[in-house]
Amino acid sequence: GHRVAFNLAFKEFDLDWHWTENKYLDLLKISGGLNRILYYRDEIHSELSNAQCSKIQSRKRNYYENLIKLGKIKVRDGVMRLVEELAEKNIKQFIVTTSGRDSLNPFLETSLRSHVELFSRIITYEDVRNHKPYPDAYKLAIKLSKQSHVNCLAIEDSSIGIQAAKAANLNCLLTLPPWKSSLNTISKRANACLDSLGNEKNISKLIYGKPLLKKYVDVDYLTSIIN
């Protein structure tokens, strides 16, 4: 959804920029949407000003919100199920994201609306000084959870996220984006990597790491990674 929204914003500003899936995977090493635009601008030696880039990011945010409202952005397989299972066992859950609050809210208010209350806290771009791959956001989540880092686990979908989690001394599970085409560039630093959290109809495929206990990721599997 984010990549599509970026490309729509670029088109509105009559730019010949177009981020392919592979290019966006590369740009995910940069934390924050505006920072990705600025990085790409410098990479291709564009003369756009910081203010112009900020306007593009603002329009991208609007496009992203519209995609959500139109039902174009779905919650990935297994997410709702796992959130419910963790809540049933009174396990604290945190959303830790490099997105800003304004970008995240539309998703929380639509696709994730029925499950937002199951999260103890939502940590966004604005809550810490240093963003992924720095560990600040995850360290804040650990502090708020009042748990030892050895009892916590991060579920991530990007290399920059894995870097941040590992820098906070967390065990972590990597789940691949649905449009990920190459396995050669994925992070090898996670405890395990799967194509999705999975469910009964769409079982998880193990890429590397801790073997699954069932056909999909459940609380017992996450516990086995920690232990």
Image (cartoon, grey):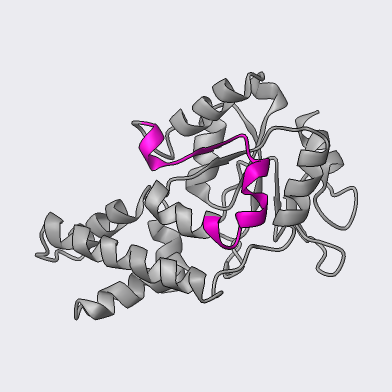
Locate residue 125: give its quadrant. top left
Q: Nearer the viewer, residue 55 or 48?
A: 55
Q: Position of residue 22 (x, y in %)?
A: 45, 69
Q: Position of residue 223 (x, y in %)?
A: 81, 34
- For residue 213, side relative to residue 61 (left or right): right
Locate residue 86: give its quadrant. top right
User: What residue do we see at 29% from left, 73% from top?
Assistant: 9
User: What residue do we see at 76% from left, 31% from top?
Assistant: 226
- For residue 42, side relative to residue 139 (left or right): left
Q: Nearer the viewer, residue 196 or 1?
A: 1
The image quadrant where one finds the C terminus is top right
Is residue 66 highlighted in magenta? no
Q: Which residues are magenta?
A: 109-128
Q: Position of residue 119 (x, y in %)?
A: 63, 40
Q: Position of residue 149 (x, y in %)?
A: 64, 23
Q: Is residue 147 above or below residue 101?
A: above
Is residue 116 highlighted in magenta? yes
